[in-house]
Image (cartoon, grey):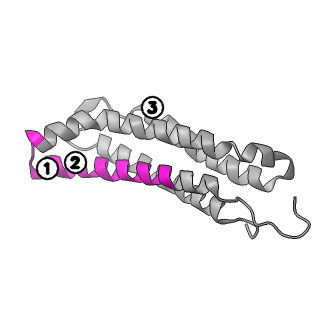
Amino acid sequence: MKKQSAGVYLMILAAILEIVTIVFYVINCNTDYFVRMGGVDAGLVGCACLAIVLVVGYVYASNAPGLKVYAGWLPVINGIVMMAAFMIFVNLRAYSMATIMSFEKSEQTMSDLSSAIVGIACALAAILLNIVGAFLKATKETAGND
């Protein structure tokens, strides 16, 4: 990890935020208001898990001399997958957010909605970190390095 640069650290932070997104989504699915909405969406969790796996692959590929060619594409693919997870999350909660804010505003529903808002914010922050990390170098260049 001594050769890692800012790009890798930002990608790791993005993966951590994806984990937080999954946690808050599952918490939100188990609240009183959202429990009747059909449970946990496999597409959202699958995309978020794939994004985490892609970050692990990126860290590995950026350190393997023969795989550095592929390391450049992994943040792009990861960004697409993270955006898909974000869009699914927003799609699943947009109508409920509008309904709660307009017609069903109470302490309980606002409390139930707060975990969705935090999860969506974490997903968006993960996307932004992924974008910035994709433009930064993955490893520090030293004399004798590829």
Which numbered dot is residue 42?
3
Q: Is residue 52 left or right of residue 140?
A: left
Amino acid type, residue under disc 2 in the picture:
Asp
Image: magenta residue range: 102-128
Q: Quadrant of the N terminus?
A: bottom right
Asked whether the residues under the numbered discs 1 and 2 touch, taking CB atoms below 8 Å apart as contact, a structural biologist would say: yes
Name the N-terminal-most of marks 1 and 3: 3
Q: Position of residue 5 (x, y in %)?
A: 69, 65
Q: Is residue 100 left or right of residue 21?
A: left
Residue 42 sits above or below residue 144 on the image: above
Name the N-terminal-most of marks 2 and 3: 3
> Is residue 76 visible to the viewer in this orientation of the structure?
yes
Q: Badge 1: few (under 14), some or many (20 or more) residues near its Cα, within 10 Å?
A: few
Q: Position of residue 75 (x, y in %)?
A: 62, 46
Which residue is identified by label 2? 112
Residue at 15% from the left image edge and 41% from the top image edge: 100
Residue at 78% from the left image edge and 56% from the top image edge: 63
Amino acid type, residue under disc 3 in the picture:
Ala
Q: Position of residue 91 (x, y in %)?
A: 33, 33
Residue 110 lies in magenta, yes or no?
yes
Residue at 20% from the left image edge and 42% from the top image edge: 32
Residue toward you, 26 or 116:
116
